[in-house]
Amino acid sequence: MRVSALSPSNSAGGLTVLLLLLDFITPAATVKHENFKTCSQSGFCRRNRAFADHALTPESNWVSPYEVKENTVLLQNGILTAEILKTVPGQAEKVVLPLNINFQKNGAVRVTIDELKRTKGDIVLRGESKARKERYNEAERWALIPDWDVRDDKVVYDNQKGQITLAFGPDLKYKAVVTVYPFNIKFERDGETHVVLNDRGLMNVEHWRAQPPEPEEGKEKSPEDLDGGWDETFGGNTDTKPRGPEAVGMDISFPGYDHVFGIPSHATSLSLKTTRGGEGAYEEPYRLYNADVFEYIVDSPMTLYGSIPFMQAHRKGSSVGVLWLNAAETWVDVVKEKKTKTDTKTHWVSESGQLDVWVFLGPTPQTIYKAYGELTGFTKMPPSFAIAYHQCRWNYVSEEDVKDVDKKFDKHDIPYDVIWLDIEYTDGKRYFTFDPLTFKNPEKMMKNIDQTERKVVLIIDPHIKNTENYPVVDELKSKELAVKDKAGDIYEGWCWPGSSHWVDAFNPAAIEWWKSLFKFDRFKGTAKNTYIWNDMNEPSVFNGPETTMPKDNLHFGNWEHRDLHNLNGMTFMNATHQALEARDVGKGKTQRSFVLTRAFFAGAQRLGAMWTGDNEAKWEHLQAALPMLLSQGIAGFPFSGADVGGFFGNPSKELLTRWYQSGIWYPFFRAHAHIDAKRREPYLAGEPYTSIIRDAIRLRYALLPAWYTAFHRASKDGMPIIRPNFVVHPDDEEGFGIDDQAYIGDTGLLVKPVVGEGVDKVDIHLADDEIYYDYWNHKIYQGKGKKEYSAPLEKIPLLMRGGHIIPRRDRPRRSSGLMKHDPFTLVLVLSQKGHAMGFLYHDDGESFDYKQGAFIHRQFMYNGNLKALTSRDLHKDRAAAAAYRKVAGALQIEKIVIVGASNSLDTSALANGKSKAKAILVEDDNGKVKEWHASLAYTAAVDKDHADVLVIKNTKLRIAHDWTVYLEQVGAEDKPKDEL
Ligand code: NOJ
């Protein structure tokens, strides 16, 4: 441990901070539960659970006290507005809550409920607070894309006896039925109800009230004096709550739905467990409150580093979704009620802000992901290196160290693309500086790394060291760009550098300033191949409540931290992303950014990648990673990874090897280790481990074209990059809960990583009767249900589903950048009927030229009856496609591999060696038919349980062009050429 590097800069409070830091860097047994609130320790959560208990007790004869005032209802330009009145017991005056229902062209609906008094600022703050009086209404500015509002102005309105029916969406196939009293909204599709808001009457908008005086002795508390609604102390910190209690709660039911997914990030199963009774239920609700929960426990609804309040409900034949657009601390209870069918009922509560719910009515997973992406944006198309392998640890300690690691990867023929520098590279934790002793010439280091087209990622955190002679903190202070405390003074807290201030990235001026810091002439030592990692941006504050900022801190516009806490990390990531995209990389050109974030919220997918934070080098953490990443994909943020090897502790060689075999399937693939962990670069593992890890990483590299294509699809329509069974097979009820195996994009590759010690076989679930082939030996697996797959240490359980075409690049290189001129391989995995289809997206991998159409997008189709493989252009702009052909025209397909060849071709002549066939007809872009002489390699099936494989080499087909290859003659016996 390098305590000296962590010593605080000023002696005042030095011991305290040292102890705090030691607490952070010394691995403990497990997460410090006592640092984080349970629901019962969080006033508004406790209140709202008690509220629910009361409402759901039959004896209470509960009727929800909310009513739509019918004479205020107005439908105009796709928005219905009205006033909801809340009846408060013992109070004549009703609380007015403006209701706004916004109907979108794609069928998404937004229901927003505010509080009239608050919109007018007609409240009195407690204490001296300078906080805003409105309910927070700016979450959409960060979470949604700027032009999200594409209104459906053809909504059809009907009002009958207290029921307002609104038909909307494409072909008016959706309906919202608003019951006026007690207020609720049923959302229907095809005549069936799929989502109900306030179904159980748990809606609760805690209206503003003055704090009632203490009751006289022997007298009861006023009902307005809500439990935990005023000053609240936890772990020695007091939250002053200038606006008193102001939580918003609502129940959302999914009738007929047995499974709900989403609301990452939690270390739990993909299909969410119940939280208030039921089999295997959690006792706590799922919590969404971004926090530095290092050494988190698995199988828990406890909050983690990031949150996306998006939930999907799924059943055979239907998928629907909701987005709870609220950035304050949020808790979600899930219950399931089994009648003839199961209904899943959820209860959402946030500490402050507006009640803002989006509903997506499906009917398929695809339609939901698309609609959600049209709102919050799709995954950004990353630079291509970012989807290759990243080598990180806390820390590579010097330039020599970096050089040594770089050399050793090459010596051991292990590809990698990015080396990462954690906090120790800085001069005493002053970001935007390099340690002058250990990183004397960073520019040269960047250059060396660039020789193999590799990159360097530097960590930059949001806490800025509060010290002398540090221009960054001087500017932060003089320009007043930092987060403020409740009194409006600059907020000071503790993090890695000791005393620190925090950049307020909600402030547009702070973003502009942040951008200026990354210019190459300002951040000396960085270069075009330098990218950034944003850590600790929940934000993590070592001496703050729950290791974060006090909720009564103030941000730009005097919004309280409470209102926007879950957005905080994303705004910081946004500033960094903008800064990287603004760097002039030569000739006035810019390049795509790469930013890794730990904290996130809905919409962060537009900005970069996330990882799951400080996991442990334990089998259960390896196991927990895949469900967590699948959940990220469901919630629209698929560029996600987990620390390969496990952050804390030292993995056994077996665990490390299995983690790599699993990690190559993470969309973001990075190894990382804690400062106290032993070195564990793959070449140190020794044989056979190093070779097995090398093979795994090489497989990732070979499949990069398939990964890039999957990223492209995610960037267009939100389809997850790695997909759980239910997304690929939405009608396979048995497979809805499966989260330990995954499909990779549209490739039909199905992986089930080994995640248990000593395990040498796994059961893979097949959802249909299609043929699946073992990737390695082409053994056939067929028939719905579980199939046993033998997986000794050197083998990754990997199947190829029949009917797909997988693009690969098979030449091992040192980095992905060095593969850019390499030819492709197409693997045709024939279906039972002999067909296959697949996709390839390709562009320069670094610039924005693809936005002007500089890319190749192909669909490959093999028709088993015609025995013809066709490459079709999916590019919509023919002129741009033709222009890019000039750039990438030389890229070839060197090999076509046909797995299960005899499903389409008569391979008997090949099997008995009578044909090495030869002349294959190729029709090019212009319809001209040529023939070329292919060299064939045929491997007959070893037995009936295996498939045969035909390899056609030297095809010289070009990926940018249209062509059809006719394989009719392939299996035929040799004939004189003129007979062909
Ligand atoms: C916490 C992060 O989660 C971890 O990945 C990093 O190594 C340390 N901070 C030090 O920067």
Image (spheres, helix red, strand yellow):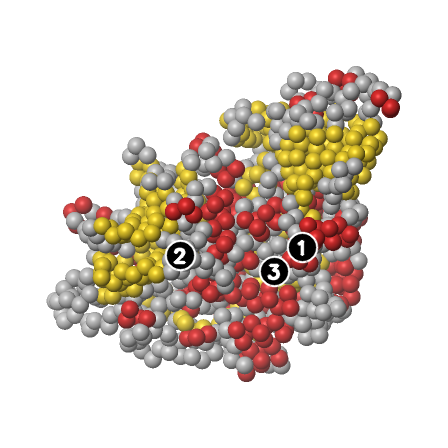
Classify 972 as above or below 625.
above
Looking at numbered disc 1 in the image, what kind of residue is underneath it? Gly
Percent coordinates x, y for residue 145 in the rendering: 50, 61
How far apart marks 1 and 2 lie (CA) works out to 32 Å
- Looking at the rendered image, the disc whose residue lies closer to the viewer, 3 or 2, is 2
Classify 181 as above or below 132.
above
- Looking at the rendered image, the disc whose residue lies closer to the viewer, 1 or 2, is 2
Left or right: residue 280 versus residue 883 is: left
Quadrant of res 580: bottom right
Q: Residues within 10 Å of mark 1 (few under 14, many from 20)?
A: some
Tell me the residue that label 2 is attached to: 153
Q: Kindly identify the residue that appears in the image at 56 percent across and 63 percent down.
A: 573
- Quarter placement of the C terminus: top right
Quadrant of res 936: top right
Tell me the residue that label 3 is attached to: 595
* Mark before the other along the chain sequence, 1 or 3: 3
How far apart marks 1 and 3 lie (CA) works out to 24 Å
- Which residue is most to the front? 927
Classify 612 as above or below 949.
below
Q: Residues within 10 Å of mark 2 (few under 14, many from 20)?
A: some
Q: Is residue 690 visible?
A: no
Tell me the residue that label 1 is attached to: 853
Q: Kindly identify the residue that appears in the image at 81 percent across and 18 percent down.
A: 973
Percent coordinates x, y for residue 223 in the rendering: 19, 64
Looking at numbered disc 3 in the image, what kind of residue is underneath it? Val
Percent coordinates x, y for residue 107 in the rendering: 42, 50
